[in-house]
Amino acid sequence: MTPEYAPTDPFGRMPVPSGVEVVALSLPVGLLTALHARPVGAPRGVVLFVPGFTGSKEDFLDFLPLVAAEGWEAWAYSQRGQADSVAPVGVDEYSLDAYAGDLLAVARQVGQGRPVHLVGHSFGGIVARAAAIASPALFADITLLCSGPHGWPRRNAKNAALVRAKGSAAWWDRDNPLLVGRPDEELTADQAFRRLRLARTSDENLLGAIRILADETDTTVDLAATALPVLVAHGVDDAAWPQDWQRAMAARLDAPYLVIPGAAHSPQRENPGATAAVLHDFWGRQAPAAPDPTDSRARPEPGQPR
């Protein structure tokens, strides 16, 4: 069985690597756009990446082929309100429950009864842990990549005020004053993409995520209670989440804690080789052994914990 999806156009004229397809997944909220890379060689399992705040599926565009090359079926999707995914109206449509509900629906589609290796990047880690707590049987394990245990009050307060007053596009203009108003041809491809992505990300997506990132609720105990294997990893220069929080969270989860060299807050872009190696090793340890066809003992149903 394969998930049902429809091909769609790349977002932001970003070149799509060979072996990666751009698709749209149909969810109750509407269409969420995704990237899909089929495994090279014998398939080892399904991997799902959840992007972070102000991000999108394109944060994993060049990374998915590295994952697929090791035999993993790799997916990344843009969350509601990000880039070219559906953007429901109203900030209440961007609650943690709503984001996590989308993730659960995506995991069911791409997993097709198989437990999914889940990776949440930064804010995507907050969404991933909420989904894992809600329905742990859908997942083989969870990686919290550059993501802490909780938020803190008034995080992004200035950005929230700017978005409320002037909209999402004003955020890029404020941070890039020398490039304001210049045509795409005068920008690098990455600059042009990031400007477009922030402008196309809905104001309510940003405001809803900011509200979640300011919440001090810590669900680490609930995540530990799922008994899912957890990996905590971040770049050596990650400054978006306090590194001591991430280290302490790993200890509370009895989880491996790995620092990726030559990287900061987006190690899958800044040091993709080392990041892929860390993930391959973790997933390989969790992958169930191939079944023995001569073994007549009962086996777990698809989607149930191993």
Image (cartoon, rainbow, N blue to C red):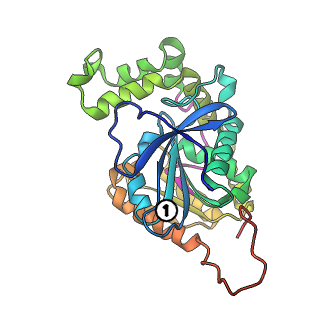
Q: Residue at x 73, y 59 (%)?
A: 137
Question: Quadrant of the image for the N terminus?
Answer: bottom right
Is residue 152 magenta-colored?
A: yes
Decide which of 174, 157 is in the foreground and name it.
Answer: 174
Query: In the image, what residue type sits under mark 1?
Result: Trp
Decide which of 14, 207 is in the foreground and name it.
Answer: 14
Which stretch is magenta?
143-156
Q: Position of residue 83 (x, y in %)?
A: 48, 30
SS for callout 1: strand
Q: Is residue 105 above or below residue 246?
A: above
Q: Position of residue 26 (x, y in %)?
A: 63, 36
Q: Is residue 250 above or below residue 109?
A: below
Q: Residue at x 68, y 32 (%)?
A: 95
Decide which of 275, 193 is in the foreground and name it.
Answer: 193
- Report if residue 118 is visible in the image: yes
Q: Residue at x 44, y 65 (%)?
A: 278
Q: Is residue 100 above or below residue 166?
A: below
Question: Quadrant of the image for the C terminus?
Answer: bottom right
Give the residue furthest to the top.
165
Q: Position of residue 285 (x, y in %)?
A: 55, 73
- Left or right: where does residue 195 sit relative to residue 245? left
Give the residue furthest to the bottom.
294
Is residue 137 magenta-colored?
A: no
- Report if residue 221 is visible in the image: no
Could you tell me how many numbered marks the image carries?
Answer: 1
Name the residue tied to disc 1. 72
Tell me which secondary structure the magenta stretch mostly adopts: loop
Give the residue furthest to the left.
186
Q: Position of residue 148 (x, y in %)?
A: 56, 49
Report crowding for label 1: few under 14, some 14 to 19, many 20 or more residues within 10 A (C-alpha). Answer: many
Q: Is residue 304 above or below residue 28?
A: below
